[in-house]
């Protein structure tokens, strides 16, 4: 269990089910994302605060660690090959960065056209990125914290029931000034949120 | 024991739908995929050829591929591992989305019969022929800047390529690496599968909308022996043949049927 005391955090915010959030984490600060009720996927994008054209790169992250999953020790890499954040704490054990975020369009393909008119992570990202002068072209392959997506040896790729428990958390140390953009995933058509989206909590500690 | 409420009845219905889609996607749909293309088969009728070209090792190419045209990429030496990105020409903010591609088709092992989806739920490319069947939709191309230098790398190639297409580095999504046999272990560790590539392997990608393409011909980061510079990639661009009622990419499940229907609305 992390020893960081919430009383000493410089920022502490609950993000309601299905909602977006963004804030800059300064170099050296620690960001904790709490899966308050368990089995809640949190989609995350990261941008270099000084130059948002440098952003999180899922493929550079996977290549650098030669492993398909994110856990303690993973360095989340940028498109320019620099470490943006390091995973320094994790009660869950496995996070995804290959399954992307849900969208109205992909929901319509997967689950049928009526699901096109359900809230989705890409709607959240578009709304939140617009506050920072960015748009759809800036939505790259993201991290999915607390999302369980095993890839088996023959390549089967499946979003399955989450393994994170109520109160589960992940802690990230910023290695540069990073604009963090989250979507508390509203998906109700697959098991990533236990078919029931719930609130999360975000805390930041100073360096 | 959960109490039955309308809310969790809806959740249970959604779970049942998901499990049914999964069972089909990893069962009957998978079984319906066409076999790999046999080496030396699928000749291109000469009258269908539009253009041919070759890109040396380390270099890149940009091109426009019209709807209904096919790009055959040929691994001449059996060592090439080209990385590819596609954008919709009419609106390049619509681009290849590998996450949706593997999620919707329930597999990261793309092969003949699969498609490449855009971020807008439409089909960009169909894999209509494929002698190799071992491609990497997860890891992408060779090193970003700031790592031990190769003479050239895919990141640098893509930055140059998007410049020539009127785009910039904000427009570079995750890339698909072809002829790149990657395995994922139970612990997530990536390994290179030897013996899965052969001289003359080819893959034919049919454009389902008019596309801009960038293709980088650099070593895959996990390729065990860095091949020498002589690893040319040959291209043939040709007009698609009519597979009639037996299109290799129209045999899969309901999801891809919808993706094609949404794509066709662009042209209705």
Image: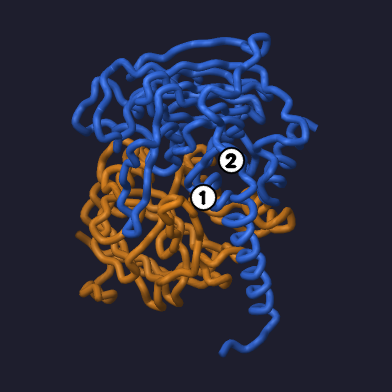
Chain colours: A orange, B blue
Please give the chain letter of the residue carrying mark 1: B
Helix, strand or loop at label 1? It is loop
Tell me the residue at 25%/76% (across/down).
Answer: A1
Q: Position of residue B267 (x, y in %)?
A: 76, 30
Distance between mark 2 and mark 1 Cα atoms: 10 Å
Q: Is residue B123 left or right of residue B144?
A: right
- Residue position for label 2: B114
Q: Residue furthest right?
A: B268
Q: Is residue A56 above or below residue A17?
A: above
- Residue position for label 1: B107
Q: Same subunit under labels 2 and 1?
A: yes
Task: Check disc 1: other Cα within 10 Å, few if <14, some if 14-19, many if 20+.
Answer: many
Helix, strand or loop at label 2? It is loop
Earlier-in-chain disc, 2 versus 1:
1
Question: For residue A14, which quarter of the picture?
Answer: bottom left
Task: Check disc 2: other Cα within 10 Å, few if <14, some if 14-19, many if 20+.
Answer: many
Q: Position of residue A37 (x, y in %)?
A: 45, 77
Residue in front for this viewpoint, A189 or B131: B131
Quadrant of the image for the C terminus of chain B?
A: top right
The reply to whether discs 2 and 1 touch (Cβ–Cβ < 8 Å) is yes
Q: Is residue A121 above or below residue A34?
A: above
Tell me the residue at 53%/31% (across/down).
Answer: B130
Tell me the residue at 19%/59% (across/down).
Answer: A207
Question: For residue B57, which quarter of the picture?
Answer: top left
Quadrant of the image for the N terminus of chain B?
A: bottom right
Q: Is residue B100 visible?
A: yes
Q: Is residue A202 above or below residue B50?
A: below
């Amino acid at each position: 269990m992390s020893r960081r005391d919430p009383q000493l955090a410089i920022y502490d915010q609950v993000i309601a089910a299905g909602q977006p959030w963004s804030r800059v984490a300064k170099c050296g600060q620690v960001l904790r994302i709490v899966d308050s009720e368990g089995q809640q996927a949190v989609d995350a994008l990261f941008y270099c605060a000084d130059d948002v054209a440098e952003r999180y790169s899922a493929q550079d992250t996977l290549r650098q660690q030669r492993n398909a999953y994110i856990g303690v020790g993973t360095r989340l890499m940028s498109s320019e090959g620099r470490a943006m954040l390091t995973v320094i704490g994790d009660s869950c054990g496995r996070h995804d960065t290959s399954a992307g975020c849900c969208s109205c369009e992909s929901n319509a393909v997967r689950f049928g056209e009526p699901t096109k008119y359900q809230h989705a992570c890409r709607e959240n990202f578009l709304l939140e990125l617009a506050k920072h002068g960015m748009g759809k072209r800036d939505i790259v392959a993201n991290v999915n914290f607390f999302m369980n997506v095993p890839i088996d040896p023959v390549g089967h790729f499946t979003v399955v029931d989450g393994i994170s428990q109520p109160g589960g958390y992940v802690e990230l140390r910023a290695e540069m000034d990073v604009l963090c953009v989250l979507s508390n995933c509203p998906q109700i058509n697959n098991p990533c949120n236990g078919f029931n989206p719930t609130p999360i909590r975000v805390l930041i500690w100073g360096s | 024991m959960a109490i039955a409420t309308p809310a969790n009845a809806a959740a249970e219905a959604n779970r049942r739908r998901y499990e049914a889609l999964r069972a089909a996607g990893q069962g009957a749909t998978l079984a319906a995929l066409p076999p790999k293309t046999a080496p030396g088969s699928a000749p291109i009728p000469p009258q269908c050829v539009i253009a041919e070209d070759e890109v040396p090792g380390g270099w890149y190419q940009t091109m426009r591929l019209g709807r209904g045209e096919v790009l055959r990429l040929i691994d001449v030496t059996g060592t090439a591992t080209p990385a590819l990105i596609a954008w919709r020409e009419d609106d390049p903010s619509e681009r290849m989305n590998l996450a949706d591609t593997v999620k919707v088709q329930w597999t990261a092992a793309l092969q003949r019969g699969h498609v490449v989806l855009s971020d807008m739920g439409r089909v960009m490319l169909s894999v209509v022929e494929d002698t190799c069947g071992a491609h990497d939709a997860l890891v992408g191309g060779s090193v970003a800047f700031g790592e031990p230098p190769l003479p050239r790398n895919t990141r640098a190639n893509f930055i140059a390529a998007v410049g020539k297409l009127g785009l910039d580095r904000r427009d570079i999504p995750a890339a698909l690496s072809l002829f790149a046999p990657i395995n994922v272990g139970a612990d997530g560790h990536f390994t290179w599968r030897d013996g899965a590539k052969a001289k003359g392997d080819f893959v034919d990608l049919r454009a389902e909308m008019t596309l801009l393409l960038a293709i980088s011909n650099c070593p895959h980061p996990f390729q065990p022996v860095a091949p020498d510079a002589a690893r040319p990639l040959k291209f043939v661009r040709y007009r698609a043949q009519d597979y009639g009622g037996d299109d290799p990419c129209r045999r899969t499940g309901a999801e891809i049927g919808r993706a094609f229907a949404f794509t066709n609305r662009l042209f209705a």
